[in-house]
Structure formats: C-alpha cells, structure tokens
Amino acid sequence: MYKFAINRPITVLMLFLALVIFGLISAFSMSVNLFPNVSIPLIKITVETNGDLNYIESKITKEIENALSEIDSIKTINSASYDNFSITMVEFELDKDLEIAANDVRDKLGTLNLNANAKVEKVASDAGAAISLFIHSKSNDSVKLMQNVDEKIKPFLQRISGVGKIEDTAFLKPQIRIVLDPNLLEKYHLNAFEVAQMIKNQNFKQALGELENSKDTFLIKGYFEANSIKELEELRLMSGVFLKDVAKIIPLYEDKKQSAIYKDKEGVVLELGKITNYNTLQLITNVKNALVNLEQIIDEDLEINIIYDKSLNIHKHLFQVIIDMCIGIALTVMIVFLFLRNLSATLIACIAIPTSIISTFFIIDLLGYDLNRLTFIALTLSIGIFIDDAIVVIENIAKKIKTYPPLEAAFLGISEIGFSVLSISVVLLCVFIPISYMNSIPGLFFNTLGISVASGIAISFFVSILLIPSLSARFFNPKESKFYQKSEKIFEKIEQSYEKLLFVILKNKIKFILSSFAFIAFCFFLATKIGLDFLPMEDDSEFQIHLESKEDISLEAMQEKSLEILSWIKADEKVDYAYLLVAYDDAKDSTKAKIYVKLKALEKRKQRQSEIVAAYRENLQNSDLKIKVLEIPKIEGAGIEYPVQFLILGEDLNDIKQAAQKTKELLKSNENIVDIDDNLGAQKNEIGIYLNKEKAKKLDVNPQYLAMVLAHSFAGLNVGSMDNGNTKNDIVISFDKNYKQNLDSLKRIKIKNNQGQILDLISVVDIIYKQNIKSINRYNKNRSVKISAGVNGISLSEVQNLLISHSKELLSVGKNLNYAFSGFINLLDETVQGFVFSIILGVILIYLVLAALYESLILPLVIMITMPLAFAGTCVGLFLSGNNFSLFVLVAIILLFGMVGKNAILLVDLANKKCLEGNDGDAALIYAGKSRLRAILMTTFAMIFAMLPLAFSKGAGYEANSPMAIAVISGLISSTILTLLVVPALFKACFRLDSKLRKFYQRKKLD
C-alpha cells in the first residue's frame, strides 16, 4: 500500500480530491442546528369535557394512565387535571419510533369509554419555535385581526416549505355571540337554557334519509340553519317574541383567555415549528422571504414583526466556533513550522487539516447526522489529532531523506512509523465505539462528537499513510535554512536535558513512581471537590422571566401586574426588546405570564448574560407575584425549563404539600439555590352551588335542568354554527358580561320546575364562596408536587446530594411518600452512567487492540497509564479555573483519553523494538526518548495551541467551550510531562514481566 501511494501520486491525489469535493457539497447542503437533534419520543393527550377537578382526575386522567401503562417502552407519564380539562404527556424510550408510539396510544385510548374525545399529538423534540411572529392591528380592530390570522395568515404560513406545527397565543377564534339580557328574559319568562333549546331546534343541518330507484340514489338532507345574522335574529322563541327581542347577535370571537403584548400593542403571536429533520436555517430563510408576499395579501391595517429568530443564535455560535477553529489552525501551523523549521515539510503536514475536516462533512452526512455546534467544537478539538499522524510521518521521512533518495526515504519513513500511526488511530477509534451504545439524551451529544472525531481520524490516518508519503517523495525539500541550523542547537539542548533527566529517573524509579501515583491519587480526590452540571448557562443574549400570581386573579389583573414588570425591563439599556405572554400554557391559566427578553449583542454591553440574570433575580421583587428568571431551554419539548426539578410523590395531597414545603425550606437555606417554587399554583376562587335536595324534591325541580340553565347563562356554550364562506363559525350563547361580574347575577336567576312554575334559583340552592386547588399533577401514576429551582454559584450535583441526604427527613411527614428527579438534574445520572460506561468499555477495547497489535499482555498497560495521568491534569485544570464537570467537559475527557495514548505509543513502540533487538531496557528507553521527544512535543503543542482560542475566547458559547478546552489542555499537559517521565520508569520492569509471560504462549513462528 505504501509503494502504491508513492508510485501512483495522481491516483492518490484524485482520491482525496474527490473526498474534499463531496465534503464541500455536504457542508453546504446538510441541515444546520445549534445542538444535535435530540429525538425524544413524546406524545401529548388532551381531553376537554364537562367535569370538576376530582371527576377529571378519577374518570379521565387515571383511566388514560392505566391504559397507557400497558404500552411498552414508556419512560415517564406526566399528567395534570383541571376543571373540564386533562393533559397527559408520555415520554418513551429514545429507541421508540414516534409514529408507532402514537399508534399504540391511539389503540389503547380506543378501548376506553371516556365520554369525551381524546386528542393525541406527536411532540417532536425540535417542536419548539424556530421563528415567532407578532401580528397586530394598527387601529386596534380585533375582529379584522382575528379574521386575517384565521383565514389568510395561518393558511399562508402553513404552505411555506419546512413549516410544521404553528402554535398561536392570544388568537381568538371567530364566533357568533348571542348575548342575552337577563332583564328581557325575565320579562318574557324565559331562561338561557330554553332559548338555547329553541335555537337548536330551529337552526341545524341534518341528513334525513335517501331515495333510491333502479337508476339513481338521492340523499335527503335538511337545511334548516340560518345563513345570516338577520335570519338568526328572526328566530321565533314564542308567539310575538323573537331572538332579537332578548339578545344581541354579534359577529365577534371567543372569550379572551390569553394576551400577547409587544411594543405596547396587543396582538397575536404565531410560533412556527419545523418539520422533523428539516434544516432550521432554511426554514427561517423561507419564512422571511415569504413575509414580503404575505404582507401584500393581508389588510393594510395589520403589521407583522419577527420577535424570535432562532437562526441568530445558531449563526452566532457557529460563527464563533468556526473563527476559533481557524485561529486554532493558524496556531497549529505556526507550532509545526517552529518545530520542523522547514516550509515544505510544514505545508505538506498541514494538508492533513483541511483534507480531514472537509472530508469529515461527507462521512457524517452519509451517516445521517446534521451540522451543529458540537460538530465544529469536535473538529476544533481534533485539529491537533488530524495533523498529529502527518507530523509523525513527515518527521520520520525527514530523518531518512538525509541519507536516502526521496522516494526511498518516503517509503522507509512510512514503513518504519506506519505501525505506530495505525496503533494511534485504532486507539483513538476505540474510545468512541462505546458511545454508540449510549441510548440516552446525553448519549446523543456524546455520539455527535464521537462520530465527528472518528470520521476525521479515519480520514487523517489515510492522509498520513497515503497522501503525505506521496507528496514528501516529490516536494519535500531537505535543505536546512539558517534558521534551522541556529535553532537546532536549542532542540539538541532540550534532548540532552531530557536524557539527563531520564538517567536520574531511571536511578530513582520507585521513588518517582510512588510520588507520581500519590499525585494521581490527590487529583482523583480533587475530583470529588469539583461540581457536576449538565449544561452551563451561556450568553445567548436572551432569557425568559416566568411570573405567577400568588392569588387567583383575572386575565386583566394579571396583565396589568405583568406590564409593570415589562416596563421595568424595557427601561434597561442592556435590553434590545421584550414581549409579554399572559396565560401562555395549555391550560390557559390566567395567573401565569411569561416575558421573553432579548438582550443587546454581547459587544454592545459590559455584563454577560449570567450577571444580568443574577441582577434581575435580585432586583425583580413583587409582593403579589412569584418571579423566576430562566434561560431559554436548550432541549425543547422535554420539559427541561428549570435546572432543578424535585418531585414529591404519593396519594395524600396534604402529606405531599407538607413534604413540598419542607423541601422548599431546605433549598432556601442555601443562598445559591434561587427561584424556588412549586407547581401547586394559586388557590382558585370558587362559588359552590349546593342543591338543597329536600326543597328541590318538594318543589319538583330537576337538578339537570337547573345545571343547564346556569351553564347556558354563564359558561358560553355552543348552540350551533353558521356558514361563513369557506369556514363555519360557532354560535355561542351566554349572558352579557355586565351580568356575569358578581354574586348578584346568580341570585337573580329564575328557573322552572317540572310543572312550569317559575322559581328563584336561591329557593332550592345554597351559594357558598370558597377556595380550592386549581389542578392535580401526577407523575408515573402518583399524585405529585414538583419543586423547581435554579442555581447560581452551586453545581447541580451539590443540589442533588443535598436533597438525597435529607430525603428521609423530607418524606417523614406522611405515609407512602416517595421522590423523583426530573429536568437537567435527572439527566446528571444518565450523563455520569454513560460516561463511566464509555470509559470502562473504551479502556477494555483499547487494551484488547493494543494487546493484539503488540502481541503482549503487559505493554498495553504501560501505554494506558496515560489515561489516569490525563484525568489528573483535567481535575487540576478545572479546579484552578473554577469550572465544574459538565456534559461538554465529559465529552472532551473521552476525546482526551484517546489523544493521550499516542505519546506513550510512540515511546513504547520504539523502546520495545530496541529491546527485542537485544538492547538493555534503560538504553532502549533513552534512545526511544531522545528519538521521539520532538514528535511528542510537537504534536502535543499542536493540539494545545489548536484549542487555545476555545479556552480563552470570550465570544458566544464561551461558558461551555472554555471548560471543555481547559479540561483537554490541562490533561494533555499533565499526561505529556508524566508520560515522558513515568512510562520510562515503568517500562523496564514491565518489559521483563512481559518477557516472562511470553514464555508461556510464544513459540517459534511458522515460516
């Protein structure tokens, strides 16, 4: 193969040129996202039906949970019950196909008798908004706004390529409102239920049968519905009394239950998600391009604003990483030149970098991955690896070319070093194989890095053994410049100093080995003092503020209180803009609001986002509101908005509440735990209508009739529909809002008994004001209360340990209580388990490969000593820099473990050869050390300098990128220094032991 590469240069060149061309095509055609596509199979089930909270929980939510529990691969079931509404979120294991999961859920729900329709939705992991639009009317014409959104804007947006689900906030569906006047009803001795029945009896469309003969079939259909407002007004209620005599019929829209405010204007927010696996950047471009056409077809009175654009964040992070990569490449080239001091050698070696990086795009595209921030970080961290093999090869060829012709020198150089290059590449690949077994959310992050690096390693290996020798044989110039000659003395002095140091170490092996292992033990102890986070808060120039009223209040009252907070935020000079959503959740809870805050670009402000968030937490205080300042979720659709989520589980709500209160008190005892809250919510105000059964029986009142009178008076029930062009508008009946404001409105209600006598409502009922819980939350078929919190200056692992250590005390307040974690804190266990599994399996694979390559059971252990040496350095680096372990850092450590073995391989490989040739162990080590020192130092410095921009750049993503780079750099430094010293100290004894073991299995080789 080596001869083929040297003798067929054009063939080799065309091979790699083809890879680069396809790599470029892939780079510009692949889907681009900020993070890897975390495909969490989620199914949402919503049910709307008449029923109080307890009925919904027992007859709807529990029934659904019991049915779903029979489906395989379910991870968690979260549900919430409200009056008239139930929502259940089912999370499946990652390997469950979403379509199959949805079908399984539908099948199980089909077996239930819920007396209500269950709506099943597939929630894609990338279901969050890619771009959000705010639409408002300049003249505050709400009817025109809602009609345009419903009939023009939403259909137009849905047709744009790549647009998936469109979520709306504050959109009101057009309705025909029948607004009853209680005074007029009383005048004609009518009530709302009777009017509703008369409307239903006179306004409907119905199939009435069919006519059929030997030739034709005719469907008989009755058209008895009104076609206009005027026809509705003329519906006869009784002799001489028409609908218009007791009510106003107004073309309006449904009752306002949400609000959206941007730049002091109320409007509608549309959040556009993307189709699964569609390119996020392309979708946003499509929408922006289409807005020009959309503005031409809507009314001139309307204005459309983009209030959220995910592409800004993606571009910002990717641009920063690419800049860091380019600087890293430049620094790497500089280091290589300073060591080789030969321009031709430097250029030949550096060809490996662009070739490997660009070709990697082609491979990861073939494997079905997208381009994301972690892909570029992985490639940046791997720059040194990509050039590493090329450096080793060209450095060895440079030595041979002094005494042999170029072609022969190239062949001898690669032949001599080729086995070491193969060993290094195989060891690196072994580190990433276990990652493919990680079936978890953290595993998807690990997998992206692993595939990116492994692809680059495979390319760089073939570049080093095929392209580099071919180019060196023709273009390498062995002539030594004056700079080379003058600087050579420096390198010779370094080699001599290292040789002297080796003599000292080899004379004091035991002392040095013991002191080294003591250092490693100390560093491992240091690791226990370093916290563990999932993902740190980064400066994305955006965050959100969640507001919740401590008492049950109306939408208008919540909006007024939220606007005070919004005004304060908008006055901050660091803020670019902000908008408000009230009652934004699925339940349209009027006590909850959310403010999205967009900060000015990082270069236009002095403080970073984490500092601003901390200041907001301190300054935003309100006696009426619970306020939480949160970052925008990095993994959308997974319910991970709060870093800390601790659930108290049980059946007795009072016991659960007591345990939750104790938990909050425990968390409040630590000042670094912030935004502490639970999901109990405010108590709802309730007016209880209690039937006096004795009076009802005596007066012959039908309770069902009574309930229907009240419901049609105050609830706004559907009594039919009316055609409106291509759509149908619901007809809704209710009292005028002026008669639905206080208790007096109830007291004046008139009902009729079974004999038709008119009675006062209060003659058969007792009306009692009280407060009750708004919702009942459940987790995995248990009632639950979720305590959520944020962190500021404390790691998630410390919070987790705090809660676990006090769990018995917290749960002692009641019987059969339990606890669970969710959110980022729950992912910590998966992250650590995946990391430990990958490391253990990686170590085993590396040992198996090295043992096979060296035909030795002991020498692999000498090489693998570099792993704990590297981890020791990582611990020191993180501790001194004040950083925690995180998902990114653990991913980098896996990469580091593959990187550090190469130094020991270069050293052990040559020393082993010399020993097998009959040289003394110490002499072989000294020779190997001097021969490989430059290559080891050069590749290590190249890898370190490639990562310096990531470590020290203060741009976007610094908070996650810097600890990652620091972990690798500090690990490389410690492993390189100690490898050059510890491996020689261990090698001789290990070689002797290996020689003795070989006697048991080694035999004379067959010819």
Image (tube, grey):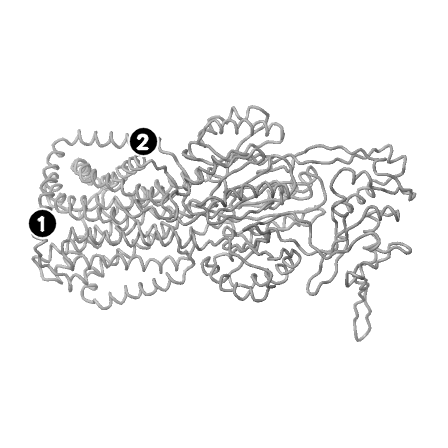
Give the residue at mark 2.
526
For this orientation, the residue located farthest to the bottom is: 215
Q: Nearer the viewer, residue 429 or 354?
A: 354
Residue 488, numbered label = 1
Q: Determine which quarter of the picture holds residue 157.
A: bottom right
Q: At 84% from the left edge and 54% from the top edge, which residue is drawn?
A: 245
Q: Amino acid at mark 2?
A: Leu
For residue 856, say whether it is visible: yes
Q: Determine which quarter of the picture holds residue 697.
A: top right
Left or right: residue 457 versus residue 92 is left
Residue 427 x/y as whole percent = 28, 47
Q: Amino acid at mark 1?
A: Glu
Q: Determine which quarter of the picture holds residue 707.
A: top right
Residue 80 x/y as whole percent = 61, 40
Spatial separation of the CA atoms under disc 1 and disc 2:
40 Å
Q: How would you rate the neighbour count of disc 2 (Cα within 10 Å): few for under 14, some for 14-19, many for 20 or more?
A: some
Q: Is residue 112 above or below residue 289?
A: above
Mark found first going from the N terminus, 1 or 2: 1
Q: How would you rate the neighbour count of disc 1 (Cα within 10 Å): few for under 14, some for 14-19, many for 20 or more?
A: some
Residue 990 x/y as whole percent = 19, 37
Residue 77, numbered label = none
Q: Is residue 178 above or below residue 572?
A: below
